[in-house]
Image (cartoon, rainbow, N blue to C red):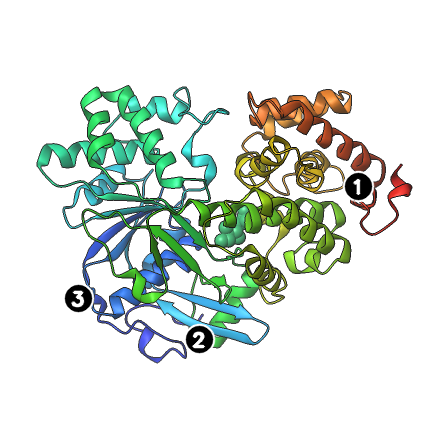
Amino acid sequence: MKTRLSNLTIANVPAAIPRYDRRDVTPGIVHLGVGAFHRAHQAAYVDACLADGESDWSIVGVSLRSPDTRDALKPQDGLYTLAIRDSAGEQLQVIGSIQSLLVAPEDPGAVLAALTDPRIRIVTLTITEKAYLRTADGTLDGAHPDIVHDLANPGSPKTAHGFLAEALARRSIAGTPPFTVLCCDNLPANGATLHRLLIEFAKLRDADLARHVADEVAFPSSMVDRIVPATTDADRARIADELGIEDAWPVMTEPFRQWVIENRFPAGRPAWEKFGVTMVEDVGPFEDMKLRLLNGAHSGIAYLGQLSGHATVDRAFADPSIRQFVDRLWAEAIPTLPQDAGLDPIPYTAELAQRFSNTALAHRTAQIANDGSQKLPQRIVASALARLEAGLLPEHLSLVVAAWIAACAARGGSLPEGHFTDPLDAALDELFGRNLPTAEMTTAAFDLAGFAKDHPERQTLIEFVATHLVHLGQGGPALALAALGIGGEREKAE
Ligand code: CS2
């Protein structure tokens, strides 16, 4: 077996290594959800700041669920390789900004101790959409068992809400200024959303804490972007060969990266702007553009790709029908974006097309297909409803919703069982088992996912989706696309 990457072995690896003495850095950030995305994105930006001499901003990485990341990285002193890949080749960089790793279910007290450490001035989060525990109408799911648990056991929480609320309460009692909470998940107005949810949670504990969270804690919103496919065993083996030592969990990514952050950090922050981060007053327009154009297209590629037998984004995007569909999807979504924000979606989508064509990433469509019920509202449904409100049709956007339903239903049939997962899986399986007529089934799926809840255009959108589902059922994506005049004659579907 090869030697393991660590502080002791790093000096000779043939990769860029941290240009600072890791013994001199102290923690300034706790990150909740220390998965591959965080390690390819925020941790890389912080690494650059540490190398620039800002030595009091290293990261305490917290996993809220599984010990896997800690188990892989602890023997490596938190070090890991970031492999930046495109058709030109691969660039390896060892990242050193994660100084320690905690696993919340094993030791919630240790996580609270980190969060109440006065040196911690920022808490960042990438916990995925579903971990915000919202009901279909977007409010905090107060009946969720983990929320119920955290309200009853404030000293040993399970959820991000429970940890943040308890830590903020303890800091307030101790006279330690609050940390700034920086949400980095793909939610619209992510900072404001988390702020609202945390106030709701705190209200269930006590009114003073709710007031403290409302008035004294900053929740800037941010838009994060970097494509990060899940690491495979083949990646691990290749990186070990290239480094000459073993790295249990290297992270794969693309050259592109973007981070746009609202500049509200009362307790201070690293000078991220020196390394390409854009600090703004209002991140809204950037977020909408990214969610609706990048993530919206990703979900379309994922579900149509799954139904068409394309395992990776680049292969699906190389399919001329899917490519044409994505161009039309962008054309539908662009008019729903804020027009006066000074952002130009045309070069943006041209760059997206290049990024989706990156054959070195092998970004799996099944990975993106996970959690559609949590992702589609902000990626697809919001643009579809905006179009309907403006008297415009959402023909292509609505096909993504239909493809989501069809791909979910295909698992255990033309797609492998459990090929991707969704928090609604049990309810969806039950729904599909009822063999309802398409229109009723679509309405029931909208009810379950809370899509377009109480929106005046809901019924119209359901009808678009149901029509696509009929085509998908009769002739798969080829027929559904042909009905849109893509890859065949419109008449074929009529
Ligand atoms: C993807 C995102 O898995 C998904 O749902 O759409 O993770 C996407 O790759 C990132 O948001 C890119 O920044």
In the structure shown, which secondary structural element does the residue marked by tag 2 occupy? helix
**In this view, the mark in front (1 or 3):** 1
Q: Quadrant of the N terminus?
A: bottom left
**Who is closer to the viewer here, 186 or 394?**
394
Give the secondary structure at mark 3.
Answer: helix
Gap in angstroms between the C-alphas marked 3 and 2: 25 Å
Q: Residue furthest front?
A: 340
Mark 3 and 2 residues: CB-CB less than 8 Å, in contact? no
In which quadrant will I find the C terminus? top right
| 240 relative to 114, above or below | below
**Dot 3 surroundings within 10 Å: few (below 14), some, or many (20 or more)?**
few
Seen in the picture, residue 289 relative to 150 is either above or below; the reply is below
Q: Which residue is mark 2?
A: 243
Q: In this image, 285 relative to 321: left or right?
A: left
- 95 lies left or right of 25: right
Q: Is mark 3 within 8 Å of ligand 1?
A: no
Identify the residue at horizontal 20%, vertical 64% (top origin): 54
Q: Amino acid at mark 1?
A: Ala
Between 350 and 232, the residue placed more toward the observer is 350
The residue that disc 3 covers is: 24
| Cα–Cα span, label 1 and label 3 | 59 Å
Q: Are marks 1 and 3 in contact (CB under 8 Å)?
A: no
Q: CA distance from mark 1 to mark 2?
A: 47 Å
Asked which quadrant contains residue 45, the reply is: bottom left
Left or right of 425? Residue 305 is right
- Residue 116 seen by the camera: yes
Instruction: Name the residue that disc number 1 marks.
Output: 480
Mark earlier in primary sequence (3, 2)? 3
Does any atom of ligand 1 lie closer than 8 Å to the CB of label 2?
no
The three-letter amino acid code for the residue at tag 2 is: Leu
Amino acid under label 3? Asp
